[in-house]
Image: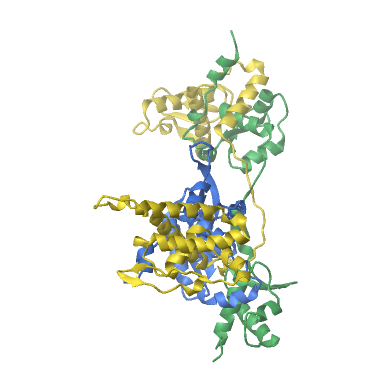
Chain colours: A yellow, B green, C blue
Amino acid sequence: MIETPLNAKIKGEDFTDLPKDLYIPPDALEVYLEAFEGPLDLLLYLIRKHNLDILDIPMADLTRQYMVYVEKMRAIKLELAGDYLLMSAMLIEIKSRMLLPKPTEIAIDDDPRAELVRRLMEYEAIKLVAQRLDEMPKVGEGVSVASAYFQHISQVQPPEVSLDDLAEAWRSVLKRASHFQHHKVGRAELSVREHMSIILRRLKADNLLEFTQLFDVVNDGIPKLVVYFLAILELAREGLLRITQQQAFSPIYIQIALDLNKNHE
Amino acid sequence: MSETSNIAQLKNVLEVALLTAQEPLSLDDLLRLFVERMERATLRMLLDELKQDWALRTLELVQVASGYRFQARKEYANYLARLNPERQAKYSRAVMETLAIIAYRQPVTRGDIEEIRGVAVNANVMRQLQERDWVDVVGQREVPGRPSLYATTQHFLDDLNLKSLAELPPMEDFVKSEIKL
Amino acid sequence: MSETSNIAQLKNVLEVALLTAQEPLSLDDLLRLFVERMERATLRMLLDELKQDWALRTLELVQVASGYRFQARKEYANYLARLNPERQAKYSRAVMETLAIIAYRQPVTRGDIEEIRGVAVNANVMRQLQERDWVDVVGQREVPGRPSLYATTQHFLDDLNLKSLAELPPMEDFVKSEIKL
């Protein structure tokens, strides 16, 4: 098939064997060509098959061999040949550029083959890792994951409520009851209300507390002490607790307001 | 010579197959695991032993219509349910407004809430808030009937990521912005 | 008082969750199993112990990209393969090379892939990879036409038993790997 012997140099040694494997029975050709993933794949095959040095590719030989394949492809599977034809053009261009007279010292970057070599090397590296990825055990193919059965009972999670939801609800309460326009709840009032609840909780536990016990003068700052005091006054005003003192300067006691019929101020 | 030389190893093969199978495995499925011929009686005996081996563990080997499978013991169902919780739909408007009133006006009685909302408070609404541990009773108002006084809990603050009620959005701004003068 | 009082019980809950989960469970997933707060360091320690407990057993506790899972030890792969004789069809070289380019060069456009492979990328190839949830679109390159940028997914790492892309087989140099001097 191929008249011209190879004239490739492998590590300085002449390589002149005729590549016997280039002959493919015509009926097998289609299958054979489909084994190549594209022109780069075919080039790599040729380079490997003939032990060419990828860093010093004999362009004339490689191009010639490549063209043999492409001609066969054209004969059988024209639509496959598009990418391959583009590569033929590139190979011929590189070959002709190498024939041009050049300065004695050529930088490696100026080698017309540099781009082709880079692409071949990159593609080969990808080919190798693709193979390794293919061979790795995968879930469903060599890796079996534990999947014992369990009775799924659904546990209903309570709804999420955000501050915005809450503010929105309060807003709609206010909106509906126009007479609540005077309810301007500010931060100060909220802390008073919070402390009203806190004091009621403590009185629920202790029943009777000395006035001073409610204040942690050492740890609470002035604002907090004031809030406690306001909370006590507000609770008294709403009739929720009773403040008693036996006589002047004796301890002041706070207790839950008792039944109205028994103790009335 | 034989691929699986002892009982422990045979049981291991059965165990790993049953632990990783997505569906129950029939006796025929399980026999396929072994190249060498195995009597069904032998297989049954091995499965019985495997079942015993797991008797005190987290899974149990059970037989269902289509074969054998490992399944989580019942006592773990509640834990496993937490992995894939189903979120309940949002709270009703009644629940949210009641919560807002308790948060902003606490301590309040049910009567206070009804007065503000203008409608009766459904017992179910209060129950939802108390079950969530967002609201509790902090005392009684000393009026006839001694109605309970409701307030929000520490847990409510935690869930809403608040240090104190003072961090609730103040409503002053709202009133100002709504009423155009 | 506490729901899960001792280490053995905590480990049992983790074990049963991991044995029944079909997908890897992250630390966050696992923390949801417990009502009471648990430090991540504690959880890691428990997982480590659990791994030790299973060290000589049929499954191993492994960590992959999206979390922890139990999987059959390698030596059982041959047995398990007999259970499902109809093996998944192998992917074509075009699919595997495209996957390799996306894995090692991500994020890449279809144009990048075509440039490296030297041939047009068949739409079917990309579809196969996306349907397997191994590859997805992570953005667009800001050039005319705004081509999609493809990357591998966490699921790809999980399926290949990897914690991160750094664990992919190293890409070898053409010259080094092939040419023996």
When asked about the image quadrant of residue B68, the answer is bottom right
| Left or right relative to A69: residue B44 | right
Residue drawn where x is 58% and y is 81% of the image = B11
Which of the two residues, A228 or A14, is positioned nearer the viewer here?
A14
Q: Residue at 49% x, 72% y: name it.
A: C54
Residue located farthest toward the front when viewing the structure as drawn: A3
The reply to whether residue C2 is visible in this rendering is: no
Residue B135, visible in the rendered structure = yes
Residue C134 in the image: state x and y as whole percent: 55, 55
Is B42 placed above or below C28 here? Answer: below
In the foreground, A257 or A18 = A18
**Vertical side of B110 occupied by B42: above or below:** below
Residue C79: percent from the left, percent from the top? 59, 78
Q: Nearer the viewer, residue A112 or A129?
A: A112
Q: Is residue A233 above or below residue A11?
A: above
Q: How many marks?
A: 0
Q: Is residue A154 left or right of residue C112?
A: right
Q: Quadrant of the C terminus of chain A?
A: top right
Is residue A141 found left or right of A177 in the rendered image?
Answer: left
Residue at (27%, 52%) from the top-left corner?
Answer: A106
Residue B48 on image: x %, y %: 65, 81
Q: Is residue A89 left or right of residue B46?
A: left
Depth check: B80 or A237 in front?
Answer: B80
Residue with the most extreme left position: A105
